[in-house]
Image: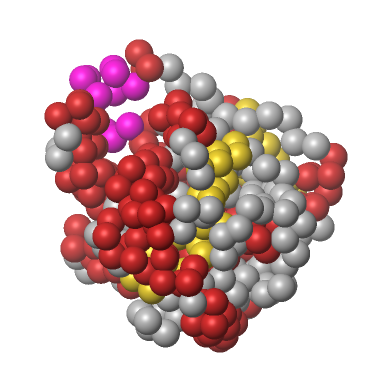
Amino acid sequence: MTTDAGQQRKVLFLTPQLPYPPEQGTAIRNYNLIAQVARTHRVALLSLVQRPPSCTELACLAALCERVHTVPAPVRSLPDRLRTLLLSREPDMARRLWCAAFWQALQELVASWQPDVVEVEGIELGRYARLLRRRYGARPAIVFDDHNAEYVLQARAASTDWRLPRRWPRALYSTVQARRLRRFEAQLCREADATVAVSPEDAHAIGAIARGVRVLTVPNGVDTTRYRPGLPDSLPLKHPAVVFTGKMDYRPNVDAVLWFANTAWPLVQALHPDATLYVVGQAPTRTVTALRARIGIEVTGYVEDILPYFGGADVYIVPLRVGGGTRLKVLEAMAAGLPLVSTTLGAEGIALTPGQDAVLADSPSELAAQVSALLSDRARAAALGAAARAFVEQHYDWAKVVPPLLELLGRV
């Protein structure tokens, strides 16, 4: 299986969901990594799937990959999760996607295709990485792409939830998970031949629990041809339009939207009574859906095409208080030339210049003031959006962020 450093390698990607269509964060990163790696190396894919993939989806992936194999994702019940919580020292994420059929398919692929490198996309597939090492030893090499420093994400979630008594059960759960993740995440990074992080902040966090491990930063990128200035407002939206996008059963997104809607949005409406807040994304929770009852807030649920919302947005917001890694939504909005108002955490990991490429604000009153100011001053909003676009083109196009990974795959 071995080749000399720098030569073309056979790279097997393991993904927790089918990376096509690239509509959500993990799938977007995985698809674009595969597309870029396939230009230099030979690629195969083994993916868990929630439903049988369509012929079109498989054909699009087959254009990049020599082999595409899928396995139905396991369904883990609440009792199973409770047993892990009470009877195991492992974090829930270590068992969430465990599936004997996936492990069997992985062994068969290693035997038949003989990859030089297995790239493990995310901590939920970490058990497979550890089993690979025990089963096969040093080859194939294992690259672990830690999409978030997960122990940090859970610690931040706990810190936020401890503030409200009704969230204390969640806070306790996250506290326990953060402690377990520290140990599990560190073990994965130490056992892998290489670890990849999405930001310098995450790389530092990984280094803090896995001392001596060298971490390569490969940031999230953006397709600057898909997300571009001048997208049409084809719906059209009600203006002025303030837009947030994201999967709306994802805990950090839910917290962000509810916090902004309850604390900052009324202040924006006081100055701009005709403004509409659009919450765009699939699977909104009951608490998010309830925002539809409020004047000036629209919750869309799943939309087939997100681009009209970027085309119609007057201001794009990222009021995140919980999370890790880097937000693809930030890069997408900036690539579309939108004026962005974000919390410091929301823009974490992206080396933008506050006030020049985007506006950062961390309190409800500051967020409301910055959004209101951009809605009032369209010239400043346009200038901010133009600077954002130029910044992303220079630093975060996928073709510019992936070369260090290509070099790594050629030498591990």
Q: Residue at x 17, y 35 (%)?
A: 164
Numbered range of the magenta stretch = 81-92
List x then y, in percent, for residue 85: 25, 24
Q: Nearer the viewer, residue 88 or 298?
A: 298
Residue 195 left/right relative to 281 = left
Residue 338 left/right relative to 145 = right
Residue 68 in view, yes or no: yes
- Residue 186 in the image: above or below residue 250: below
Q: Quadrant location of the N terminus?
A: bottom right
Reply yes or no: does residue 83 show up in magenta. Answer: yes
Q: Nearer the viewer, residue 355 or 19?
A: 355
Q: Residue at x 49, y 39 (%)?
A: 295
Q: How is the image coloured?
A: secondary structure
Image quarter of residue 283: top right
List x then y, in percent, for residue 31: 64, 57
Q: Residue at x 22, y 20 (%)?
A: 87
Residue 355 left/right relative to 51 = left
Q: Residue at x 34, y 22 (%)?
A: 81
Reply yes or no: does residue 144 show up in magenta. Answer: no
- Residue 98 in the image: above or below residue 110: above
Q: Nearer the viewer, residue 15 or 130?
A: 15
Q: Nearer the viewer, residue 154 or 63?
A: 154
- Residue 124 in the image: above or below residue 382: above
Q: Main secondary structure of the magenta part?
A: helix
List x then y, in percent, for residue 58: 79, 44
Image quarter of residue 47: top right
